[in-house]
Image (tube, helix red, strand yellow):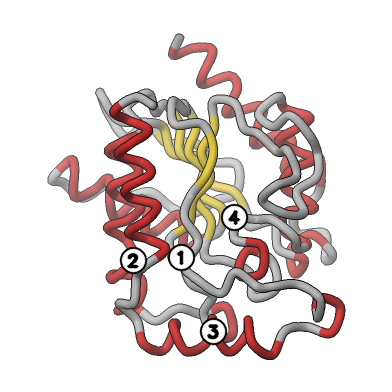
């Protein structure tokens, strides 16, 4: 294990042990205790969910928060729910994932050149974290960005992920970066900073209504691949 891996593992342990937001601690544990009928035989994760993927990633994907019966159950981002069922086939097709499915932590899924994280690490009631909860959790994402020293592109899935990721990069540049959340938009944040790409979140609310189609999502990863190839 190299130094970077040790730092990531230390950060992951800190995230998993986090108790900063009492409302979220209570809710994630309640969801894990009550369970969904389809998953009664599961031992839910019921803890904060760390990011995962390639520690030498050139692409960072940022979502909102774990799903109640997805990552809060499985312990891995976008694993075991509808969002992951839409995300991972697209990543597999684009060459970032070794398989198109994600059902549990021990399913053999591996990411190449990519790390997946989120703004919040605990499932929020109604999928709506409060501002203070976001602020409590955001330092974990900042630390992951610090450790991902090969980063060339950040993909924000949804407006909250876009706004909060931009908030981090604004602080680093020390200036007001004015970019609008528009699906498919890509923004240069300046020298020494990764590009920022905006995408609708692959939630069922978006994918089942046609707001986000497979073709639209594939175009996001094509843009990401183009940026990586240009930055080589």
Pointer 4 with pointer 1, Cβ within 8 A: no
Query: Which comes sooner in the sequence, label 4 or label 1?
Result: 4
Task: Assign a secondary structure to mark 1.
Answer: loop
Left or right? Give the position of 53 relative to 141. right
The label on residue 212 is: none
Residue 36: x %, y % from top left: 78, 83
Q: Residue at x 76, y 38 (%)?
A: 90
Left or right? Give the position of 60 relative to 70. left
Residue 72 lies, with reference to residue 213, above or below; the image says: below
In front of the other: 65 or 154: 65
Residue at numbered disc 2:
137
| Quarter of image, res 151 | top left
Tell me the CA gap for discs 4 and 1.
9 Å
Pointer 2 with pointer 3, Cβ within 8 A: no
Query: Which comes sooner in the sequence, label 2 or label 4?
Result: 4
Tell me the CA gap for discs 2 and 4.
15 Å
Residue at numbered disc 1:
121
Residue at numbered disc 4:
77
Pointer 1 with pointer 2, Cβ within 8 A: yes
């Amino acid at each position: 294990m190299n130094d970077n891996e040790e730092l990531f593992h230390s950060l992951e342990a800190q995230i998993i042990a986090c108790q900063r937001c009492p409302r979220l601690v209570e809710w994630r544990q309640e969801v894990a205790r009550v369970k969904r009928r389809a998953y009664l035989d599961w031992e839910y994760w019921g803890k904060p969910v760390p990011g995962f993927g390639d520690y030498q990633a050139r692409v960072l994907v940022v979502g909102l928060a774990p799903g109640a019966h997805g990552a809060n159950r499985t312990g891995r981002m976008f694993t075991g729910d509808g969002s992951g069922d839409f995300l991972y086939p697209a990543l597999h097709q684009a060459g970032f994932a070794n398989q198109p499915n994600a059902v549990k932590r021990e399913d053999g899924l591996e990411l190449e050149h990519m790390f997946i994280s989120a703004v919040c690490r605990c499932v929020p009631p109604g999928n709506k974290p409060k501002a203070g909860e976001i602020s409590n959790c955001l330092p974990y994402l900042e630390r992951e960005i610090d450790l991902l020293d090969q980063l060339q592109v950040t993909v924000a899935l949804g407006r909250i992920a876009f706004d909060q990721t931009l908030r981090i990069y604004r602080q680093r540049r020390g200036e007001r970066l004015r970019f609008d959340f528009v699906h498919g938009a890509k923004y240069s944040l300046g020298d020494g900073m990764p590009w920022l790409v905006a995408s609708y979140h692959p939630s069922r609310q978006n994918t089942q209504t046609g707001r986000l189609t497979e073709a639209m999502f594939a175009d996001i990863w094509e843009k990401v691949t183009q940026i990586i190839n240009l930055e080589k």
